[in-house]
């Protein structure tokens, strides 16, 4: 099942509960929360208190994307705040296996994220201890950027790797996905499609999520 996963980065933070309500009515059951520290990426966003407040307003799966240095220091805080999945960047972890273990110890799904320039081959051995993989399709830090086309080849390669290993782990993609390129992204092999500006900057976020879910379901039917 392909999921459309709205990223609240492009939502109106002063009206977050209403914004979340809109995308949930459109059918979204996973929300993507981008955490940035101004070091790993040149931008700052939210921390555990905001995640905790969001947790009180929704029953959706909260997918926390940590774009921070030393993510192991904050895993317990985000898990305690109500995250259902937490992903950490390969590029930010000196001891990736250990960090994934820490996340799982909190009974939270553990994800590995790769920047566009990092090849999927680095995941060869760690796939078994991850619950999902997030491939960045833009350089992380900001919403509203263009999808980098070669990342779709990485998706195809990773899809091949998981088939060979008979692993069911979802492939998530993040950045630059909109109504026009969504079908191609799904056909490449993505399961969780993060989308920020295409949803929250649209006239009717609820209708946009619904339309995206339909496009994704049709494209997935061709893929299977
Ligand atoms: C970028 C973030 C994304 C961002 C995607 O660093 O990780 O989640 O919100 O936004 P769009 O869909 O606008 O590219
Ligand atoms: Zn993200």
Image (cartoon, grey):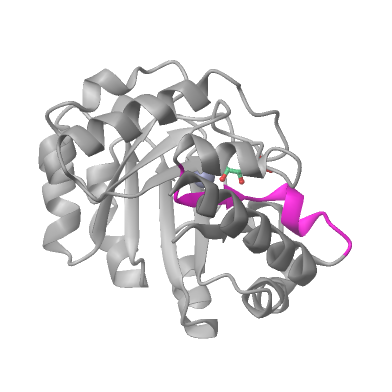
Left or right side of 172 for 110: left
Question: Which segment is the magenta one?
Answer: 190-203
Task: Please say if 213 is above or below 146.
Answer: below
Q: Is residue 174 visible?
A: no
176 or 47: which is nearer to us? 176
137 or 89: which is nearer to us? 137
**Which of the 4 image quarters holds residue 213?**
bottom right
43 or 212: which is nearer to us? 212
Left or right side of 8 for 93: left
| 196 within the magenta span | yes
How far from the left and from the top, in percent, is residue 217? 57, 59
Left or right side of 50 for 99: left
| 139 within the magenta span | no
How far from the left and from the top, in percent, is residue 44? 57, 42
How far from the left and from the top, in percent, is residue 95? 14, 31
Left or right side of 119 for 21: right
Residue at 72% over, 75% down = 22
For ligand 1, the image quadrant comes to: top right
**Which of the 4 image quarters holds residue 165?**
top left
């Amino acid at each position: 099942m392909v999921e459309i996963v709205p990223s609240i980065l492009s939502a109106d933070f002063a009206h977050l509960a209403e914004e979340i309500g809109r995308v949930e009515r459109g059918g979204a059951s996973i929300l993507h929360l981008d955490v940035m520290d101004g070091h790993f990426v040149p931008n700052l966003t939210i921390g555990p208190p905001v995640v905790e407040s969001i947790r009180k307003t929704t029953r959706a799966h909260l997918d926390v994307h940590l774009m921070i240095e030393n993510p192991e220091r904050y895993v317990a805080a985000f898990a305690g705040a109500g995250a259902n999945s937490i992903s950490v960047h390969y590029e930010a972890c000196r001891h990736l296996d250990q960090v994934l273990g820490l996340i799982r110890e909190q009974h939270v799904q553990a994800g590995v994220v790769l920047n566009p320039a990092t090849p999927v081959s680095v995941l060869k051995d760690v796939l078994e201890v991850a619950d999902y993989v997030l491939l960045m399709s833009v350089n992380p830090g900001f919403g509203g950027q263009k999808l980098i086309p070669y990342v779709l080849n990485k998706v195809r390669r990773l899809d091949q790797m998981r088939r060979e290993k008979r692993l069911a782990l979802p492939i998530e993609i993040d950045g630059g996905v909109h109504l026009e390129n969504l079908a191609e992204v799904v056909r490449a092999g993505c399961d969780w499609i993060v989308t920020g500006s295409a949803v929250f900057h649209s006239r009717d976020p609820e209708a946009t999520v619904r339309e995206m879910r339909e496009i994704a379901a049709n494209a997935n039917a061709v893929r299977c």
